[in-house]
Image (cartoon, coloured by chain):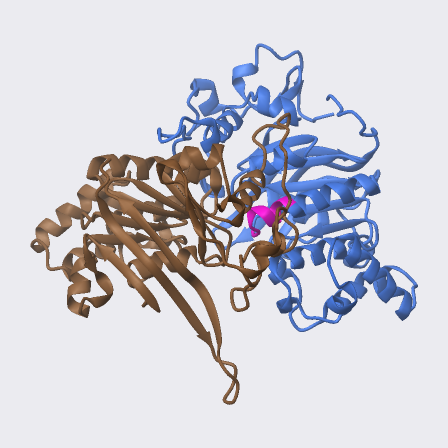
Chain colours: A blue, B brown
Amino acid sequence: MQKEGGAVNNKILEVKNLQVQFKTSIGIVQPVSGVDFQVNEGETLGIVGESGCGKSVTSLAVMGLLPSPTGYIAEGEILLEGKKISHLNDREMRKLRGNDIAMIFQEPMTSLNPVFTIGEQLSEPLRQHTKLGKKEIRQRIIEMLKLVGIPRSEEIIDEYPHQLSGGMRQRVMISLAMLCKPKLLIADEPTTALDVTIQAQILDLMKKIKRENQMAMLLITHDLGVIAETCDRVIVMYAGQIVENTDVRTLFNDPKHPYSQGLLASLPKMNERKQSLYSIKGNVPRPDEIPKGCAFSTRCPHVFDKCRTERPPLLKLNNQSCRCWLYEAETQEVMSHVK
Amino acid sequence: MSNEAILEVKGLKKFYDIHQGWFKENIKVKAVDDISFRVHKGETFGIVGESGCGKSTTGRTILRLDQPTEGQILFEGNDINLLPYEKMRKLRRKMQMVFQDPYASLNPKKTIKQILTEPLRVHNLYSKKERLEKAVEILEIVGLSSYHLERYPHEFSGGQRQRIGIAKAVILNPELIVADEPVSALDVSVQSQVINLLLQLQKKFHLTYIFISHDLGVVRHITDRVAVMYLGKIVELAETEQLFTDPKHPYTKALISAVPINHPDEKKERIVLSGDVPSPANPPSGCTFHPRCASCMEICKREKPPVISFDDGHTVACHLYTK
């Protein structure tokens, strides 16, 4: 795997063969089936995919936030700086969350508690993880709010979430995640609910904070524009599996998997105005409808017999790894794990 | 495309009152504040803007789902606000709406057959048998088939539901469709399918669209002319290509520059606007954009900018271009 310039090759997060299952009334479904990736220090890894591809479940599994007891890790492990965290109990996990790993959610309104002031909510991680006194905590919070560009932070700290706009709330969420200087920040669709001009502000802010803290970031989104803007490496997910894993330039210049190619081609910007857009036929399969062979075989324009019967492994190519039988001949080595 | 106007909006205003308690004066929220535009027959007219700029309110008042506070809406020359209820109901046959959220806009208790034949039934069109034939025909046009007729909305995916929402609007053979963020709730691969469907239907039925969206990529792709709204006002109106290649208003410039890049190697001169959109209940004085504008002058704080016309119907409301 090629490394982006400037990124230090120091693994922060490693996910090995992660399989997540949910118990439902129709039996066990598996939204994530065998995902491997790693995030290095100072690097932003993007996960793209459509709804239901398992990208959010992957991030919840890393955070240890799977809804217990219905959701659980069936197989595989998650390592944070070489330490296994996938089988920690609640107490031990709580020490990590907000301290070493922090998360920003999509909808800032629902992830802030409406009945507590901003200051009360932001002091929680500091009370949990540090031994600072009340005054110091308040000082830290005000500094942090200033850092994320919130004006009049001395007043905002005593206000309630409903008094803030969407962009401000997302800034509060970012400051909440950043308070304990985490090693890994997981951002799940951080700008999807925001307007474009606010999105530009928030993305700039996240890039700045990441650069200053040499933090690793896992960015989950369905928006390829956001990926192009912020990520160093990208994972494309489809139906619970990684279909392509590459650096961001290769993904945009030379996507290999038919699904990644289709996603890029269906962007309006890539098409002639007023002409019909390229589109991938069909719909994203539900977890119980995933075909037996390659998960994408029902929608793939290049499908052949082998695709329908056998699931392709992640093949290692020159610049990327790709889960597709089309490249079987080109590959030197069949890999079950991404190094 | 002809220059014949199918819809003309003149000085449209829509204010909402917010009750503040018995002894306090109500706050007026100026959701739409004096906008005017014409929509030509057969074109796709886009309205873009950020949340709270009044683009959806505009769409709803055009169909008289909301009563405007002031102003005229002329559909084929008739002011629809003066029409009595029954006549308006008849006229809605010609103007339909596609909503953003396909999960919320279909009645979960009705089958697709009921949903699709209802508009025909309400308008007393065709016999029962013909209505059913019509429903099957339209289902096939939007890419579904007759065996979906007896199903309920929850059995469909988001993209399929939006197809049903579109079918419901098209079944009456309308002339104007107001599409309020029709693809915003959909995934990328499904989004392109629905956009294709809209383009294809427009050709087939010679439809006129008013396409309301915040996604500039989609707007650039399918519209002919675009109006950019900010805090209830149209700040710029131009042909789509012209607007994207030569934006005049500082807000339009910032909006276009804020769109994420298409490729990691693309370098973009980004104008990052500071602050948020002010509350429409208490808009800034003068030009409402002045607190966030990079080229703000003294006059902008005091006076509302006039609407200035360039060639090809490109209009801008900004003091920078006066004189």
- Can I make out residue B241 in this image? yes
In front: A5, or A297? A5
In this picture, residue B141 sits left or right of residue A147: left
Which residue corresponds to the image point at 43% horizontal and 18% vertical from the top-left? Answer: A304
Q: Which image quarter holds the N terminus of chain A?
A: top right
In front: B142, or B19? B19
In front: A230, or A24? A230
Q: Position of residue A13 (x, y in %)?
A: 77, 38
Main SS, magenta residues: helix
Q: Which image quarter holds the C terminus of chain A?
A: top right
Q: Is residue B323 above or below residue B61?
A: above
Q: How many marks?
A: 0
Check if residue A197 falls in the magenta segment. yes
Q: Position of residue A10 (x, y in %)?
A: 84, 32
**Magenta-highlighted residues:** A193-200
Q: Position of residue B123 (x, y in %)?
A: 14, 59
Which residue corresponds to the image point at 58% horizontal and 50% vertical from the top-left? Answer: A22
Q: Residue furthest bottom?
A: B23
Check if residue A227 falls in the magenta segment. no
Q: Is residue A112 above or below residue A221?
A: below
Q: Residue furthest front?
A: B323
Q: Is residue A100 above or below residue B19?
A: above
Q: Position of residue B178 (x, y in %)?
A: 31, 51
- Can I make out residue A314 in this image? no
Q: Is residue A329 above or below residue B247?
A: above
Res. A69 image quadrant:
bottom right
In this picture, residue A15 sits left or right of residue B259: right
Which residue corresponds to the image point at 75% horizontal and 53% vertical from the top-left? Answer: A148
